[in-house]
Image (cartoon, rainbow, N blue to C red):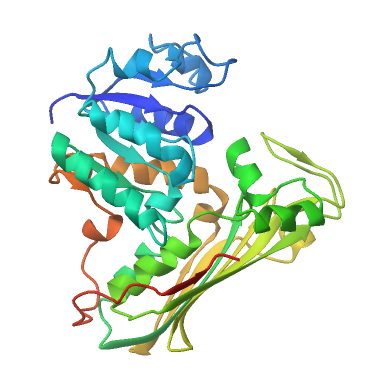
Amino acid sequence: MDEIKTVIYGTGAMGSNIVRLLQTKPQVKIAGAIDHDPKKIGRDLGSVSGLGSDLGVDVRFPPETILDNVKADLVIHTTTAFLEEAFDQITAVLQRGMNVLTICQELFFPIGGNISKAGQLDRLAKEKRVRMTAVGVNPGFVMDLVPVLCSLPCWQVDKVFVRRIVDFAPYGPDEMRHIGANLTKEQFFQGVREGAIGHIGLLETTAMVAHCLGFPVDELQQTKEPLITDVPRESPFIRIEPGRVCGFKQNAAALMKGKKVLDFRMVGIVASDKNTDGVETGDYTRITGIPNVDITIKEEIAQKGGLGTSGVAVNMIPRLLSSGPGFRTMDAYLPVHIWSAVDSPQPISKISYY
């Protein structure tokens, strides 16, 4: 494989993980790094990412200082979960004729108002003859790719239930804000009403599974509740006092004419402890059909989701670069699954975000 000249756009927890993993890939040369944090600008990327040695690449801002001066094969984008925030950043990269691999969760399988923006990115990528995809571990693996792949031996699928219990301690400040860590209960629900609180991507995961299984889903529903800690909790990025939000319960469901066919439940806790919280991290999937399928993934992915996200991102690089121009969601790269005999599910007419 030829050398892959790469820019890291965002050097938080996920971006730093990706930098460290890329050190094991001799085909990749990191040629630039972008971040808006004043504490990082001007510092060597190796130091910022915790490598313990310099890479000879300084973190720069604004983005144009890198994008206008480095002709990269690939930009790995890790700044935000929200498409509204990521759209202009990604557009600027595509306009300069560089491929994009992003971990923006709302781009994993765009729904609702995000479909239009994703279409704009797709058209721009095709115009510039470059490739783009959105990846992760959730969305991107445990609650979507796993049940989709496990549908392959089924004659039919009637219902899918997925439960995920994850420790959010490895995630950075951006993710802490999304889950409402250290807020009061009232602040949590206010954030939910504003659309700023909760794990981003669970509805997108549900929509992609429905699409792959051929379920003509007409409604998506989502609920969010806070978890309040009785003990102090600490991660590398936050300290949470007793009486404050330490996590959340979030459920997403897909309905066909009022019947629930997808039931996805997620619990996220910062610094999870089995004895204190009464739950064990891990992932469980049950496909009800012919035949039934049960899959349990033990705690490691749940405890090290940050590493998993980085792994998915880096491992997808060859697949992305060998694909055709345009924006593709992960179902385009998926291994085989049940043949639903449905060309394309109907557009979802109702989405309840909270």
Residue 65 position within the rendered picture, expressed as x and y whole percent measured from the top left? 37, 13
Which quadrant is the N terminus positioned in? top left
Residue 170 position within the rendered picture, expressed as x and y whole percent measured from the top left? 59, 41
Q: Is residue 265 left or right of residue 320?
A: right
Residue 28 position within the rendered picture, expressed as x and y whole percent measured from the top left? 26, 26
29 or 329: which is nearer to us? Answer: 329
Which residue is at 43% across, 11% downward? 58
In the displayed structure, 55 sits above or below 155; it is above
How many numbered marks have been drawn onto this rendered protein structure? 0
Q: Is residue 198 left or right of residue 336?
A: right
Q: Is residue 258 left or right of residue 270?
A: left
In the displayed structure, 125 sits above or below 281; it is above
Which quadrant is the C terminus positioned in? bottom right
Which residue is at 24% across, 52% downward? 328
Which residue is at 35% across, 66% downward? 208
Residue 98 position within the rendered picture, expressed as x and y whole percent measured from the top left? 23, 29
Which residue is at 45% across, 31% downward? 15
Note whether residue 111 is visible. yes
Note whether residue 171 is visible. no
259 or 240: which is nearer to us? Answer: 259
